Amino acid sequence: MSLLDPPNAATLSPPAEPRLRRGGDERLAPIVAKVAEGRRLDREDGRLLWETPDLHTVCGLADLVRRRLHGDVAYYNVNRHINYSNVCALRCTFCAFRRRRDEDGAYEMDVERVASEAAAAEAAGATELHIVGGLHPHLPFAYYTDMLRAIRASAPKVHLKAFTAVEIVHLQRISKRGRDGLAGLRGVLEDLRDAGLGSLPGGGAEVFDDRVHDEAFKGKIRAHQWLDVHRVAHEIGLNSNATMLYGHVETREDRLTHLELLRQEQDRTLRPWAETQGIDLDGEAVVLTGPDERYPRARQPMPGADGLDGGYFQTIIPLPFFPDASELERLPGPSGLENLRTLAICRLMLDNVPHAKAFWIMQTLPMAQFMLQNGADDIDGTVVWYDITHVGGAGTHQEVGVTELLKAIREAGCRPVERDTLYRPVERFGPHGIDWRLAERES
Ligand code: SF4
C-alpha cells in the first residue's frame, strides 16, 4: 500500500493531494511538497529518491503525477519491429545482437524483403514499424532512403519510426557529410524524412557519461552527439523518444546526469509552446506534472500545436540491462525493485516528458503491468521480432496479442487506449479489427 493518499493506487481514482503517512521516510516530506505544488525536483531530491528505503512513497508520487497527466488511461500500440541487419562495425560490451559480417548468424535484409515485411505488417493491422539495425560497414546511404521509399510504397499508412541516433551519425558519415557538422546532420535527417521517416526511436543513448561510455560502449556516439541528433530531428519536425539503459557499469549518479540532460533539452524545446499555453513556468523549467490549475489550456504538447515549431521528446523508456550473452555477463543486471524504482524516478525527474513507458518486452509483461500503477502510462505494443535484447534466448521473436495486452492493462486498473506513434488515439473497425483510423481526442 502506498504511503500517500489515496492509499490504493490500483483504483486509479482522481489524484488527491499527496502527503506522507505515519511510518514513511520523513526526509521525503520536501519532495512530497514539491510534487504537490508542481515544482521541479533537483539533484539532491533525485539522490534521495534512489537512497530512501521508502519505495512505496516514491512509487506513490510517480503514480500521482502519472494520473495528473493521463488519468486512468494506459496506452498501447500495434506495431512490428524490423531489425534490417545485425552486422555492426562496433562492439559494445553489453550487446548480444551484433555480428561480424563473416560470423555465424550474421544477416542483412535487402530492400525488397523489408518492404514485403512492412506490407505484411500493415495488412495485419500494425500502425507502426520500428526499424533499427547495426552500423553496417558496407551498405550505402542509398540503401536506407531506398528502404524507406520502398516501405512507403508497399505500406503507405504505417508510421516509420526508424534509426537510433547512433545509426543517424553513421549515416551522416557514410553519406560523406561527417565534416559538415550540424548542417550535415540536418541534411541526412531531411533526406530520411523526405523518404518517409516519421520519427526517431530513443535508443543509443545508453547512459550519458564519458567513463561509462569508454568502459561499456566505446566507439559509440557520446552524449552531446546523441542530443544533437534529437535536437536537429525536433527542429525539422520529427518527434522522438529517449531511453536510458541502466544496471550495467553506470552509477545512480550517472543516471541522474542522464535525466537532467534530457530534461534540459526538453525545456529548451518546449518553452515557447508552454508560454503560448499560459503554463506557469517554474523558473526556466517547463513542468507538465503539476496540479491542474497550472494548465489553463493544454497540459501536454501535441504535434503541430500552437507555439510548437517542431518535434519534442514524447516518452522516456528506461531499459534494464540484460547481461546474458554479452561481454558483461559477469554482472547481475538490475533487480525487479530496481526496475520499479528507476521507472518511478524517471517519471518524477522527467517532469517535462509527457509519457513514461514500461517496455514489456524488456521488463516482462507482469512487471510492465505493475509499472502501470507506479508511474508508467504506456506499455508499448504487440511487438513481433525483437532480436536486440533476446538474440539466441528463449524469448526471440516475441509477441503478445492485443487481447493479452488489454487484459494486463485492465487488471492494473487502467483504461486501455490504442495510440499511434504520436499518441493520437486509434479507432478500429471492420470485421477483424484490422482497419483503423485516428479517433477524436477526448477533451
Ligand atoms: S549496441 Fe548497436 S552499435 Fe553497439 S554493437 Fe550492438 S548493434 Fe552495434
Image: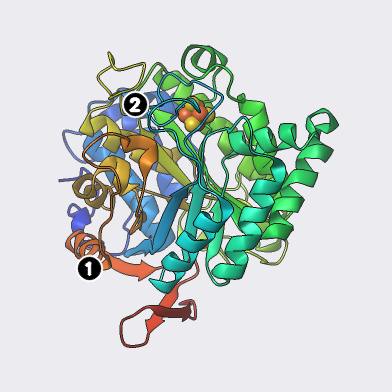
| Looking at the image, residue 14 lies above or below residue 331 | below
Q: Report the disc number at residue 226.
A: none
Q: Residues within 10 Å of mark 1 (few under 14, many from 20)?
A: few
Which residue is nearer to you in this view: 117 or 407?
117
x and y percent of residue 97 in the render? 40, 32
x and y percent of residue 206 in the render? 48, 29
Please name the residue that numbered disc 2 is placed on.
50
The answer to whether the residue labelled 1 contacts the one labelled 2, judged by CB atoms less than 8 Å apart, is no
x and y percent of residue 295 in the render? 55, 62
Under mark 2, the amino acid is Trp
Please name the residue that numbered disc 1 is placed on.
403
Q: Residue at x 62, y 24 (%)?
A: 222
Under mark 1, the amino acid is Thr
x and y percent of residue 34 in the render? 44, 41
| Looking at the image, residue 440 lies above or below residue 398 | below
- Please tell me which of labels 1 and 2 falls first in the chain: 2
